[in-house]
Image (cartoon, coloured by chain):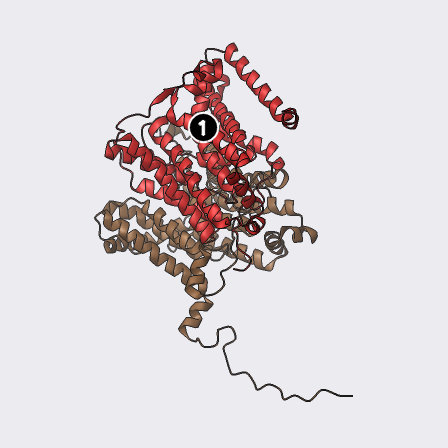
Chain colours: A red, B brown
Amino acid sequence: MNTWVAKNRTTLVVAAVLVVAAYVFYYAKNDIAPSMFGAAWGYAIPLVLAALVGVIGERSGVVNIGIEGQMLLAAFAGFFAAAFSGSMIVGILAGVGTGLLAGGFLAWTTVRWRMDQIIAGVVLNIVATGLTSFYLVSGEILPGVIPNIEVPVLSAIPLIGDVFFSGRSAIALVAIVAAVTVHLALFHSRWGLRTRAVGEYPSAADTAGINVERLRLVNVTIAGSLAGLAGVYLSMDASSSFERGMTAGRGFLALAIMIMGAWRPLRAFVMALFFGFVNAVASQLQQTGGVSIPPQLTGTLPYVATLVVLAVAAGRVRAPGAVGQPYVKKDQ
Amino acid sequence: MSDTKTVEPPPPAPEQEPSVPRDRGGMLAYLIGHQSGVVILVALAISLLVGAALIRYQGVSPWFAYETLIREALVYDGAFTRTLQKTAPLVLTGLAVVLPLRVGLFNIGGQGQFATGAIFGAWAAYVAGGAGFAGAVLGMLVGIVCGAAVGVLVGVLKAWRGVHEVISTIMLNYIVAGITFWLVVGPLQAEASKTSGIPQTETIPEAARVGSVAGIPIGFLIALALAVLCWWMLSRTTMGFRLNTVGANKSAAGYAGISIRTTIVLVMAMGAGLAGLGGALEAEGTLHRFEPAIVGTLGFDGITIALLARANPLATIPAAFLVGILRTGAAGLQFNTGIAPEIVDVLLAIILLMVSIPVLGKWLFRSRADKVSVASTSWGS
């Protein structure tokens, strides 16, 4: 226990400072703080899921630029499947399934066909924009809503309970569970060890008997389901409609979050919250019209914040060693 | 002492073509020697087939649709000029991706760099409109400089802080969109626009516009010249040599004394400057002002074009022409058949997909696949 505390000193200190600051803000500005934190978490939910997709992929050694496209396709599929079938469940399944399929496409083209990973992602994004705009039909409505859940004990905790566990969408809870699960799996399970090996030094993993190609295929495909869920959240929960290009760059923001989180699920979670918070601040500034900053400029705040944080932090984190390179066995 | 037996020289080898496998000749040999061209044609064919299926599904005859597309782009009155007008910015946004790609950088910021050049170029041309064509030239220069400024930012962030250019360029796209939108409804808004509610900048006076010469848009000629210039730079100059070397092997280049950081910033500035020029030309030549919608898909199409052109500046011309035909034709297609213009996105994506699979070439030609990675770089460097 003591060694763990000692080794993770900085993280614990930073976390403590953040938590204290959050609570101070919460009690000091009780009029706007709860809604700001709530908005922050709402904005962060799809980012968390999308960042997890990126983390799983890159830890396996596959760059996924196509998260944006995966989310857009899933948002489209989920929304229209639900609208036309009259069942939210069908919509959710369609969305998650589409994410899986898109993930499978990426996995197959990059791992089996050894296509350049970035090009594959770009292709996916173009296809997603094209198909979703081509088949867009307006005027459809959802048959229902995704239920909000009140978690019994946890929702009583002063700040955290309000924001995360009280009256939040079911998908939000799945996002939290997913982040924790991926963290545990990646760092405390056999699958996680193999995945990281494959992402760092695939030839060594290969020598140890791990099927590099198959692991990458499976990981990238299954991670797609999270992107699918993120898309479903966008079109079926956060808003109840599908608009052209509604993902608005979130897939790329998620990649930035992944990098800032040093390819670690829980840190990515925190970074996503940070972004949500910056976005909430921007909205707040737009509303109160404060400091005469025009709304179009405050809208760029999350993106500016990304650049700033990356400029400060990016040089210091290290990507998995073999990310971006297709693995070719020596005798092929 | 000679102890070597004199050996009969081996019988002369039978006459054969220098670079073609022994028992093939003629057409097949030509095809094998021009693999990339064939792969592109096959890709085009497959994508047209898939497009035909989608079109058929909408209840329209694919023949009619494709025929309409070609007519709208090439045959009708003024169509060819319109297509060339559309091709010009595409060549430039394509070059904007090609140059950094040669150094291993993936510039996805064409949208933002284009918009920056467009708004400031339009404004400069408007302000200097009294000076005639010199005003247009000023607009172009301003466009180049402003676009390049964005590129320098990306390059510096990459070279000194290790910020991956994919993310920084995308972030800048959004930031530029916000800034230009604010400018066009704020400080740079046209008087008429304030009443009409349509966000625009002031119209550029006639004299400072970029027109056509014998039906060929001047912008197209400029773009053509720049593509050739880029090719010449890359293949015949020292700077081009440096770019290619850094792209091929960073550490070897560094060891040879080439400054990697300067190269990165320089190439991003060049690429972004070209995109900015594209924006300025589009504002001066096509729209005669700046509107938020001026960028359209031009930035992203540039990426497709660069990848289709396999990072060869000269090849951006036919690639841009293809995209220009598709985009110009698609507008008319919607008018005549009701097919949404986004079908072009699907067609382009399929072509890009087919062209990018190394195994496809392998399967077609039973030869070793080319260098696998064109664009992938690790996040950390």
Q: Residue A311 vs residue B362: left or right?
A: right
Residue A314 at what x, y percent from top left?
59, 35
Residue A87 at what x, y percent from top left?
26, 31
Q: Which residue is mark 1?
A: A177
Q: Work out which quarter of the rendered image holds the N terminus of chain A and state it.
A: top right
Number of residues whose C-alpha sits closer than 10 Å to that of mark 1, classed few (under 14), some (14–19) or many (20 or more): few
When the figure is inspected, residue B220 is found, relative to residue A20, above or below; the finding is below
Q: Quadrant of residue A236?
A: top left
Residue A301 in sight in this render:
no
Residue A109 at what x, y percent from top left?
43, 50
Residue A270 in sight in this render:
yes
Q: Secondary structure at mark 1?
A: helix
Which residue occupies the extreme left position in the image?
B59
Nearest the viewer among A28 and A143 is A143
Q: Residue B181 vs residue B327: left or right?
A: right
Residue B368 at what x, y percent from top left?
50, 63
The residue drawn where x is 41% and y is 63% is: B38
Mark 1 falls within which chain? A
When the figure is inspected, residue A273 is found, relative to residue B27, above or below; the finding is above
The residue drawn where x is 30% and y is 46% is: B331
Q: Amino acid at mark 1?
A: Val
Q: Quadrant of residue B365?
A: bottom left
Nearest the viewer among B363 and B381 is B363
Q: Residue A90 vs residue B124: left or right?
A: left
